[in-house]
Amino acid sequence: MEKYVTILLKNGIRVVHQPSNSHVAHCGFIINTGTRDESNGQAGLAHMVEHMMFKGTKKRKAYHVLSRIEDIGGELDAYTTKEETCIYASFLPEYFERTVELLTDVVFSSTFPERELKKEKEVVIEELNSYMDNPGEWIFDEFESRLFANHSLGHNILGDIKSVKKYSSKDVIDFVRNNYHTDQMVFTSIGDINIKKLKYILEKYLGNQAPSYRIIKRKKWKGNFVFNHIENRQTYQTHCIIGSRAFGYLSDKKFPLLLISNLLGGPGLNSRLNLLLREKHGLAYNIESNYTCFNETGNFNIYFGTENENVKKGFRLIRKELDNLMNKRLGPIQLEKAKKQLIGQIAISNEINSNLLLSVGKSYLLYNKIDPIEDVYKRINKINADEILDVSNELFHPDNMSSVICH
């Protein structure tokens, strides 16, 4: 089957579709608007918009929005990140037009009624309370808020209770008007759908939306804040995170760092830190390494939870592994194994069409092209030991590393 079909509508909305023989189809909007587009005093507003998208349109009440897809066995979902908002659905292919019509109605004709906003603010506050009760989640946002201090990239996606309580329907409407532009939208789909019919449906529902274009440029993050913060919460377990700023989407160094992160604390049980802290020393149940890309920067961190008396030993063992990466070249066999593991994990993730939908849509949003997965594999296979050393030395020097401890 043809790999991808791309369409540029006259209002600037980009479309990318992948044909598939699957019995389930997926589609949705990925919008280049997220937490980093919030101004001062708007923390959590991008996330509130996402919640309110399902609370009524010019022709539907909240119940009818939810029922439109679920009545035919489909699923409607959404999420907000620091840089994107995604609204998408999974359904049987014969309901493609029904789904496109609903998603278009939600994105372009939501009314954000005050009465629904009042209820949804309480829902988000409960979400915040749940999040604050979970230090294993809280610590990641606390680390990032300090890493990108004084910039909207540091905003907690959920906001805070004070900010959430103050928002009005007008605040939500103004945020959408100022940030949801057709030239910053990608409509992405995967499924067994006739291409001629697909183009007709997209022109019918998306193509007749009024064009709007982003004028204001995002404020870029500059600087490198280093910190060591301890939070006292009387928790049973001490939660620890250590990391540094990292590389953005356009940096070619993101591939070596992705491999390093996976080697250190990826999902495989044979990751270096899992074998060291959990299997060898029994210090932690969960230890993981994470790398998040943004446009011009990124966030690399290592997390583990342990008893308070083991914190220093845990950090010392992690430091030892980071020093090894800075000072010792990976041998050919080690490097080859690390590449194969990363490629395998990417392949398995993309085997799930709902994951592939979001990956393809985001790639088209950022780069205006879809790199064949084989090209990604080729780039990973080209990573050499010198790149690993260079990236490790650039990021992992002790003077560059920050930490947050919660106990």
Image: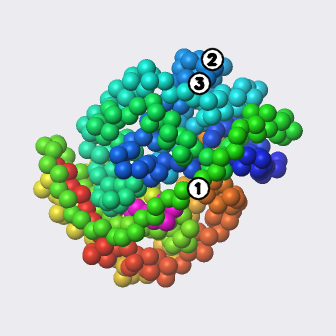
Estimate the x, y position of residue 186 in percent, counting from the top left.
66, 47
Q: Residues within 10 Å of mark 1 (few under 14, many from 20)?
A: few
| Residue bearing mark 2 | 71
- Where, by quadrant of the figure, is residue 398 drawn? bottom left
User: In the image, 79: left or right of 402?
Assistant: right
Q: Three-letter amino acid code at disc 1?
A: Ile
| Residue bearing mark 1 | 215
Q: How many marks?
A: 3
Estimate the x, y position of residue 175 in percent, counting from the top left.
49, 41
Q: Three-letter amino acid code at disc 2?
A: Asp
Circle 2 sits in a helix, a strand or a loop, which is it? loop
Q: Earlier in the sequence, mark 2 or mark 1?
A: 2
Q: Three-letter amino acid code at disc 3?
A: Thr
Spot the residue most to the right: 196
Residue 363 has which mark?
none
| Residue bearing mark 3 | 57
Nearest to the eye among marks 2 and 3: give it. Answer: 3
Dot 3 and dot 1 residues touching (CB under 8 Å): no
- In the displayed structure, 258 sits above or below 25; it is below
- In the displayed structure, 55 sits above or below 287; it is above
- Where, by quadrant of the figure, is residue 129 drawn? top left
Magenta residues span 294-301
Nearest to the eye among marks 3 and 1: give it. Answer: 1
**Residue at 46% of width from left, 33% of height from top?**
170
The foreground one among 272 and 130 is 130
Circle 1 sits in a helix, a strand or a loop, which is it? loop
Q: Is residue 78 visible?
A: yes
